[in-house]
């Protein structure tokens, strides 16, 4: 088994410090593994002995032996006939739509190799284990995906909030985090300082930090308890297709983990929210059957986006229209 695959498969066996080294290795594989042990330790925010312990855990007698194996794997990979054939096919003709679809299918498929199952399971567990408060935030574009995740989680869990400005307008909501709370932070390249500051603030309050980021890893990783790296390479912009699939997988995982508790929350939500459907007059007097989204258990309130407002309840309901 290639070394990076073994690291990926054994993440749940590692100590927290060793997991930091493993994440740094996987984020910049194989280049990170060719750095000195001291340099890799600095990148991972750990110590040189931790790097050496990880190499030993993987079955290598020394760090140089670990690096020799990496170099051998690189040479084998570059000389592979399959690799050369794939490169030639990738440069072949095809429609723009066809290439775009193929690229995004590949990116979605890459989730299986970029997100360690043990980290995904941890994320589901901390969200499903009756957190006192769940706050979700994102960057310039990823904020919209944080809103979608907040809107869907709010139908399963109480006390879920999308926090648009955690250190500004929404600081009061963000300060509700504490021991037993969970901050879900989305931060993709080009990584934003506010995400790092918010993560540090959440940790000071005793909250668990779940980071969803690209495979180059946001600096938030320094404060994160759980890290879910997503490959988003695209032209000309990053592709968010794999992020959306990860969001849906998280929601499905949380619903399964909460069981009847989550289903009961969904029943309460559906009984309390009325959304006007096109072509469905509900009252004899012609008035629409629309009381608007109602908060249930302290869910997400409206947040500013551009010139208008978006309510996470509305987002979630719109996403489930048929």
Image: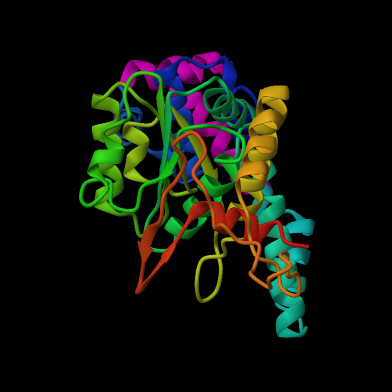
Q: Outermost residue toward the left? A: 168
The x and y percentages for residue 177 are 32, 29
The answer to whether residue 207 is left or right of residue 1 is: left
Which segment is the magenta one? Answer: 47-76
Query: Along the line of sight, which residue is nearer the eye, 209 or 178?
Result: 178
The x and y percentages for residue 124 are 59, 29
Q: Is residue 313 above or below residue 71?
A: below
Figure quadrant of residue 180: top left
The residue sitting at 47% across, 19% down in the picture is 54
Indicate yes or no whether the magenta region holds residue 266: no
Q: Split into 4 quadrants, where in the image is the C terminus?
A: bottom right
Indicate yes or no whether the magenta region holds residue 68: yes
Q: Is residue 257 above or below residue 31?
A: above
The answer to whether residue 82 is left or right of residue 139 is: right
* Prevalent SS, magenta region: helix
Number of numbered callouts drawn: 0
Query: Along the line of sight, which residue is nearer the eye, 14 or 52?
Result: 14
The x and y percentages for residue 213 are 46, 47
The residue sitting at 66% across, 46% down in the picture is 248
Q: Outermost residue toward the front? A: 285
Query: Along the line of sight, which residue is nearer the eye, 45 or 128?
Result: 128
Q: How is the image coloured?
A: rainbow
Q: Split into 4 quadrants, where in the image is the N terminus?
A: top right
The x and y percentages for residue 85 are 78, 65
Q: Is residue 113 visible?
A: no
Query: Along the line of sight, which residue is nearer the eye, 98 or 145?
Result: 145
Q: Is residue 181 above or below residue 221?
A: above
The residue sitting at 61% across, 44% down in the picture is 272
Q: Is residue 18 visible?
A: yes
Q: Is residue 99 above or below residue 322?
A: below
């Amino acid at each position: 088994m290639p070394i990076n695959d073994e690291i990926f498969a054994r993440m749940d066996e590692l100590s927290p410090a060793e997991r930091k080294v493993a994440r740094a290795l996987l984020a910049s594989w194989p280049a990170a593994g060719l750095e000195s042990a001291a340099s890799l330790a600095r990148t991972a925010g750990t110590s040189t002995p931790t790097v050496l312990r990880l190499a030993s855990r993987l079955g290598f007698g020394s760090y140089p032996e670990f690096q020799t194996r990496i170099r051998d794997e690189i040479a084998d990979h570059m000389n592979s006939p399959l690799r050369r054939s794939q490169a030639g096919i990738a440069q072949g003709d095809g429609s723009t739509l066809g290439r775009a679809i193929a690229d995004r299918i590949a990116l979605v498929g890459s989730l299986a190799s970029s997100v360690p199952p043990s980290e995904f399971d941890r994320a589901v567990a901390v969200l499903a284990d009756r957190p006192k408060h769940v706050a979700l935030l994102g960057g310039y574009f990823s904020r919209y995906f944080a809103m979608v995740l907040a809107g869907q989680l709010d139908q399963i869990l109480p006390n879920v909030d999308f926090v648009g400005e955690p250190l500004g307008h929404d600081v009061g909501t963000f300060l509700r985090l504490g021991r037993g709370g969970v901050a879900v932070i989305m931060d993709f390249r080009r990584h934003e300082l506010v995400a790092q500051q918010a993560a540090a603030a959440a940790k000071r309050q005793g909250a668990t930090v779940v980071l969803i980021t690209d495979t180059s890893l946001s600096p938030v990783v320094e404060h994160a308890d759980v890290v879910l790296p997503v490959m988003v390479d695209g032209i000309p912009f990053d592709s968010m297709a794999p992020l959306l699939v990860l969001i849906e997988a998280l929601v499905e995982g949380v619903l399964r983990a909460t069981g009847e508790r989550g289903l009961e929350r969904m029943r309460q939500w559906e009984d309390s929210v009325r959304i006007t459907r096109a072509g469905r007059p509900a009252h004899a007097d012609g008035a629409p059957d629309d009381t608007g989204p109602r908060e249930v258990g302290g869910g997400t309130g409206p947040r500013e986006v551009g010139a208008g407002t978006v309510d996470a309840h509305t987002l979630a309901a719109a996403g489930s229209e048929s």
